[in-house]
Amino acid sequence: MLEYWEWVEHTLSCFKSHLRACHLSNAVYALLYTYDHDPHVICAFCEAWCPESNTLHTIFREILTSLRNLYKLGGLPIYAKIYDEAVPSSDALYQCRQNN
């Protein structure tokens, strides 16, 4: 996308305090990087994923997967507590909205 990285850098520099207050700064920072992945694996994963149980449904059985497995299959780097930092709770988002 044209000027994509410039937009991300601008957003990070102009809204750094707001992004940190909402615990979104690391998620936006991650947009500066590209990730190698196999689109066929991602497509198969999405087709087999059951959001109600957070499991994969295959022809053999239902499979529970870990973050480590998702890292190995998809190639997305996972460090520390990425979900705690990148996906704040609705309460945290509501608090951030109230403070602004």
Image (cartoon, helix red, strand yellow):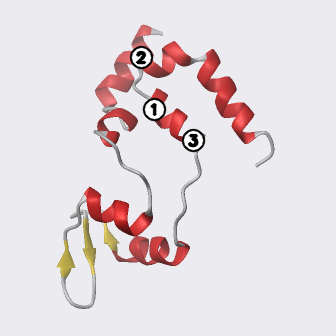
Q: Residue furthest top?
A: 99
Q: Earlier in the sequence, mark 3 or mark 1?
A: 1
Residue at 45% x, 32% y: name it. 26
Task: Write down the residue under mark 1.
Answer: 26
For the residue marked with disc 1, what is the amino acid?
A: Asn
**Residue 39 point in image, percent of width and height:** 54, 72
- Tell me the CA gap for discs 3 and 2: 18 Å
For the residue marked with disc 2, what is the amino acid?
A: Ala
**Residue 13 point in image, percent of width and height:** 63, 18
Residue at 51% x, 78% y: name it. 40
For label 1, the crowd category at 10 Å Cα-Cα, with few meaning under 14, some 14 to 19 and many 20 or more, is some
Residue at 64% x, 25% y: name it. 11
* Along the viewing direction, whichever of 6 and 96 lies nearer the viewer: 6
Task: Write down the residue under mark 3.
Answer: 31
Q: Which mark is residue 21?
A: 2
**Residue 45 point in image, percent of width and height:** 39, 73
Q: Tag 1's secondary structure? A: helix
For label 2, the crowd category at 10 Å Cα-Cα, with few meaning under 14, some 14 to 19 and many 20 or more, is some
For the residue marked with disc 3, what is the amino acid?
A: Leu
Q: Is residue 73 above or below residue 96?
A: below
